[in-house]
Amino acid sequence: MSTDGGPGPVTGAHVLAATVAALAARAPAIVAAAAAELGEVVLGLHFGDGTSSQLTAARGHLVVAEGAPRSPDVEAWFDARAMNLVFDLANRPVDEVMPHSLDVRGGREQVLAVWRTLRLLGQRASGLRAVQEVWRGYREAHPGLWGSVAAQAPEPPSPDGLRPPRGTSWTALDYLDARRPHLLPGGITDGTVADHPRVLWDGRTSRGWWEEGRVWDADLLTVMLRCRDRVAEEMDRLIPDRSPKTSLYDLMRAYPARQGKGLRPTLTVAACAAFGGRPEDAVRVAAALELFHNGFLVHDDVADESTHRRGRPTLHERHGVGLAVNAGDGLNLLAIDGVLSNLETLGLARTLGLIHEVLHMCRETVEGQAIELEWIRRGFIPRPDAAYYRMSTKKTGWYTCISPCRLGAVAAGECAPARLDALNEAFRWIGIAFQIQDDALNLLGEEELYGKEPLGDLLEGKRTVMLIHLMREAAPADRAWLEPLLGLTRAERTQEAAERILDAMHRYGSIEYALDVADRLAHRGIRRFETDLAFLPENEGKGVLRQIAHYVTTREL
Amino acid sequence: MTTRGGAAEVRLGPSGPYPSAPLTHPLDRRWLHYAFRSPDGALSVIANLSVLGASPGSGSRPQEMSILLVHDEAGWASSQFNAAVTGVPWSAFRLPDPGPRLRVGTPRGAPSVDLDLTRTGRACTSQCAPFAVDEHLRWQSEPGVRARGTLTGAGGRHAGSSLVGYHERVRGHWAWPHLGGWVFGFVNATGADAGSPAAPPPFAVVFTLIQPPHPADAPTGSVMVWRHGRLLRHFPRRTLHVGVSGRLPRDLVDTAPPLAATLGTAPTAHVPGRLRITAASGDDDLTIDVTSVTACRIVNPNELGMHGFSVHEVLGPGRVVGRVGGEDVEVEAPAVVEFAGGADVD
């Protein structure tokens, strides 16, 4: 049995690797927090089953290398019993390390850093169902480890736990503990976070039901898939089933069918929940936003002369510019219809608020597009990164990050400008960081991750942080051949020319520089998220927004 | 002797409770509460007819606020706080008997109810929850009330409906943040053993836990069991354990009155997904288990702050098992639970 469902034994090293991998995909905030605690420390881990791992932190990631650690600052030996500390979720928390079951050696400060890291991982990761499944695999493979603890727990009075507690001294909490995870009728889970049952009254001490624990983390992967699929359903509903099909409505379905990660829908739905609204209330405007986005993409691809989008030929490549532009216009029209259809569900005030937000988003986007197209037309490349930040915020920042959040908040009924504006700075920096990473992905040649043709941005002459850095740092001799190349139109620019520019970027460290900038901006955004949005109560919606903020630092590059 | 609202009165403990004493302070409150569910759980009615005291010296009359919720296959339908009450509504606590009808509705027709109510048992003795300084809530409960008639909800008109439920009267003087919150609910046995439609349910259970914010040991609570309409057992607060787990997804929580949704109402905590109560005293014990399926959040204005007092009317299947007075109790029936709280002092 293995943690990833494949063959092979479940070992301590495998569980650690699977846990970190699951967290990087599902709860980046936990990984980022743990990486911050670990800092520069190299941790060697030796498990009771004879396996070993090395754990280090790099640029917000946790890196697990299976096998004997090399020159660790701190080494920790767990015997089988001490694994209870990390992997025990079925039973009551074990508060103390059993004698002689755990040995940690290293410098005082480093050991404390390791302790904080493992404690954070153990506590925050344990709330996620996906991680619980990984750990359950380990428990089931090594049932003997849990024997001594399990024996202390009373057996449920009956399989369904409803018989009276006669003779068992079971209280309400014991029943609820035995029934986790909580399932609603029909098998619907109540979220991606498995919180512990709470006692409201034990005959002596009271705690209000409304005093719920802080929800710091959420399972981002599952939430993004759910939001993406739900919003896709709504988009499908908004595109009418009528003629002409082959020349219009089928084309309008083409880009939405090429599903992305679901970032924007998740931001909109999560922001709605974070501001106290019902997530379902944000679905329609999220679908409208996706239609706007797809309309922009169609037109953008025509303007940029792109050949591929999300791994497949662009609409104008396949159907010609005329039909593509018309389909893009149609998508924008349906998007307006989608926003207006909120009148039935959200009422006039919130719908007017949504229209105001959408208009602002569209204005920022076309202004940003105009700035970049003008730069390309004039062969202009700005020197300071700040010029790129401004253009990027306008061109993509508003509609990928800032507006989705604001629209979600408005759908929840938030109308105070100051509270809506509190979203701007955090998600502005996160949006720019995300865009820089996307641009880097295009240059790293991972078509599957990016979806456009390799080096497509260089062929288009797109102004990126990498290009700005290159032109700022390049020696005069290199600038002499770069400038004429960048002045060419897309049709004149060849693949060889693009590869030559890429080679220069590698030589001048432009890609590494851009990734560092993205990391720095992402952390700036995360800081603003925590300070500017402190007024929002901790709930799962805010937990999802936080995970997205950290997603930028841990996404696969 | 103390003075409240300019009127001198002799104080012998908490004032009230139910005589027709005037409401002379904005924090003086009184209400009649009605909650019914059909035996199959498809239809539910919740109505609250409340009166708030007038401001002292203002010369104004006490403020009447009534709200009606109807839940059917199309979901929740809610009135504003101005649901129209026609005639004198039935109450087991009103003399002379005003007649059986409860007619509450909105001008647009939905939600509305026109029900004939019949009591099948007797109310519990009055209970009182004191808290803060000189504030209290006093209530009297009666489960097993049968309702028959027409109700109109989001799914249309349901004529000839039969429901069984709960009635209470409340009187007191409090500010919402000082009260804290409560967990309240009831289950009436409605299965095959429920007897004739006019008979009392074989078993009915009412539970209450009122939780002032401090001190931590101040809650007032009870679990009460009725057998064939008579109060059989009262488990006092020290014998209870109350726990919750999970969360009801926010999509399953409506907001009422409808106006609250347009006023930027602040979010509240998640409604728990499951409630479990155990009570044990001597040879008697009881376990109550209710799963939340849907909820309507009634946002009540808070006199001391911007965060309203939210009463979540939660519907779901209820199960009760135990042994009381030497007899086994086993009930499986639609339940109503209220998770109330969330008001703050600004």
Image (spheres, coloured by chain):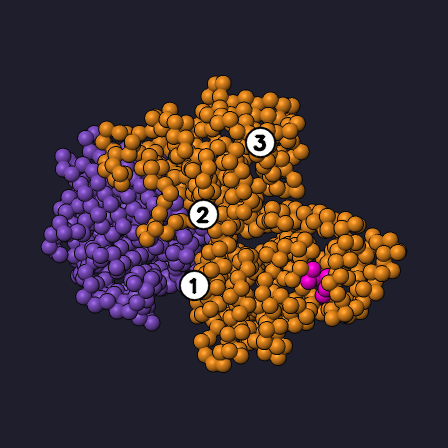
Chain colours: A orange, B purple
Q: Amino acid at mark 3?
A: Gly
Q: Which residues are magenta?
A: A455-460
Q: Is residue B137 above or below residue A280?
A: above
Give me the disc on residue A192: 2
Drawn side of residue A239 relative to residue A64, left or right: left
Mark 3 belongs to which subunit? Answer: A
For the residue pair B319 and B265, the one nearer the viewer reads as B319
Residue B170 coordinates in the image, percent (x, y): 29, 49
Q: CA distance from mark 1 to mark 3?
A: 62 Å
Q: CA distance from mark 2 to mark 3?
A: 32 Å
Position of A443 relative to B136 (above/below): below
Most extreme residue toward the top, as rendered? A100
Q: Residue at x 71, y 69 (%)?
A: A370
Label 2 marks a residue whose chain is A
- For residue A67, the mark is 3
In the image, farthest residue toward the right: A476
- Mark 2: amino acid: Thr
The residue under label 1 is: B259
Check disc 3: other Cα within 10 Å, few if <14, some if 14-19, many if 20+.
some
Query: Are marks 1 and 3 in one subunit?
Result: no
- Residue type beneath disc 1: Leu
Residue depicted at x 19% and y 60%: B162
Query: Within 10 Å of the Cα at label 2, are there few (<14), some (14-19), or many (20+) other Cα atoms?
Result: some
Tell me what residue is drawn at x 34 percent, y 26 percent.
A151
